Image: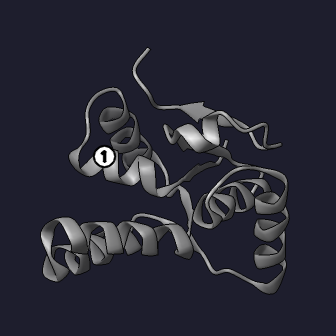
Amino acid sequence: MTHCLDAWAVLEWLHGDEPARTRVLALLERERPVMSWINLGEVAYTLERRAGAKRATEVVARLRGRLALDLPTPDRVLEAAAVKARHRLSYADAFAVATALAHDAVLVTGDPEILTSDTACQIEDLRPS
């Protein structure tokens, strides 16, 4: 089974609480989860705001070797746009959904916008029970 990470999952792995931190670490140790470059960009700008450009650059460099990064092709851009049109999600979240659908992957997240939408992708909820 393939897994897809969104920015929420990666940020929780870096600075969050259980069970998200442990689950994402396990996925990174066991496989190369897929992630959209758009969502990695979201991680980068969030980290730069929180911890500075140097920290953001270090984390992105580390993740590049641990993730199967998905370039936003024209088809993926249009699929994300269609997801965005049908659901109350940010455009970056729509890329996470579109990427998961394109790779027939389970989207691993705890993002409330994604979890409360009725997208067609499979979702694994990382929030505590």
How many labels were placed on the picture? 1
**Tag 1: residue type?**
Trp
Whole-percent x, y for residue 26 in the image: 38, 39
Tell me: residue 16, above or below residue 28.
Answer: above
Whole-percent x, y for residue 122 in the image: 73, 37
Tell me: residue 97, above or below residue 51.
Answer: above
Whole-percent x, y for residue 39 in the image: 51, 67
**Which residue in the protein does label 1 denote?**
13
Tell me: residue 43, above or below residue 23.
Answer: below
Res. 30 image quadrant: top left
Q: How would you rate the neighbour count of disc 1 (Cα within 10 Å): few for under 14, some for 14-19, many for 20 or more?
A: some
Q: With 59 as the anchor, is 70 left or right in this view?
A: right
Q: With 68 as the anchor, is 73 left or right in this view?
A: right
Element at label 1? helix
Say which residue appears at 46% left-offset and 31% top-offset. Answer: 126
Q: Quadrant of the C terminus?
A: top left
Q: With 19 as the anchor, is 101 left or right in this view?
A: right
